[in-house]
Amino acid sequence: MAKTRHAASAGKTAATELGAARRRDLLEAAYTLIAEKGLEGLRTREIAARAGVNISTLHYYFGTKDALLVAIVEHVADKFGEEQRRPAGQGDAVASLRAHIENAWRSFQDNPRLATVLQELSLRAQRDPAAQSALRAVHEGWNLAVERLVLQGVRGGQLRSDLDPRAAARVVTSFIIGAMTQLGVDAGAFDFHLVSEELDRWLAPADGKRARKRPG
């Protein structure tokens, strides 16, 4: 009996892993096709063929067009990097903010199609409620994580005391997205690191000195 239960459990685990792998393959196929042809040219049969499965398999994992679109948004968000949406830690807020921007840069460098697919999804979200809701949730989580970093830096005297953390967070995230959009069109438009240093100076206290956080 124990062997039977163990075999059944192993079978379920294998089936779950296979299902997860097929789902990832379908989403990666959709991601690649969006980069190549845009969302308007996206066809479910082509996604299935690119993933090496039949159309019924795609419908099994994504029952509706809206479900597929939401899953694509989440897949793209994962490529952007989970670290971009994590709450601030207890360390140096300025170093964390710099690392956050560097990680964002690295995400786009490691995934050359990312900027193109994000633009396609953003355009679709303007007229598609499902895409809009999914993409809004991603942006809200990202902005909140940066807002916490900024607030931590303001309270610790590492960033300008007159900063509005919510507005400053939107400046940071908008810079990253805007920079990737421009560099996606012209890779030599500007030096990302040089411009991010200007952003860092804008966030710094007026006297240029980073105050140490007071204990307690």
Image (spheres, rainbow, N blue to C red):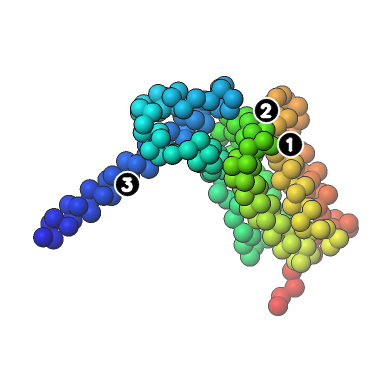
Q: Are marks 2 and 1 in contact (CB under 8 Å)?
A: no
* Quadrant position of residue 106: top right
Task: Give the residue displayed 76% in from the left and 38% down from the top.
Answer: 194
Q: Are marks 1 and 3 in contact (CB under 8 Å)?
A: no
Task: Give the residue displayed 65% in from the left and 55% down from the top.
Answer: 145
* Quadrant position of residue 87: bottom right
Q: Earlier in the sequence, mark 1 or mark 3?
A: 3
Q: Between residues 113 and 138, which one lies in front from this camera angle?
A: 138
> How many residues crowd around disc 2 within 10 Å: few (fewer than 14), some, or many (20 or more)?
some
Q: Earlier in the sequence, mark 2 or mark 3?
A: 3
Q: What is the three-letter code of the residue carrying label 1?
A: Gly
Q: What is the three-letter code of the residue carrying label 3?
A: Thr
Numbered disc 2: secondary structure: helix
Tally of marks:
3
Whether 185 is drawn above or below 57: the answer is above
Task: Give the residue displayed 28% in from the left and 44% down from the top.
Answer: 15
Q: Which residue is label 2 attached to? A: 184
Whether 39 is drawn above or below 164: the answer is above
Q: Which residue is label 3 attached to? A: 16
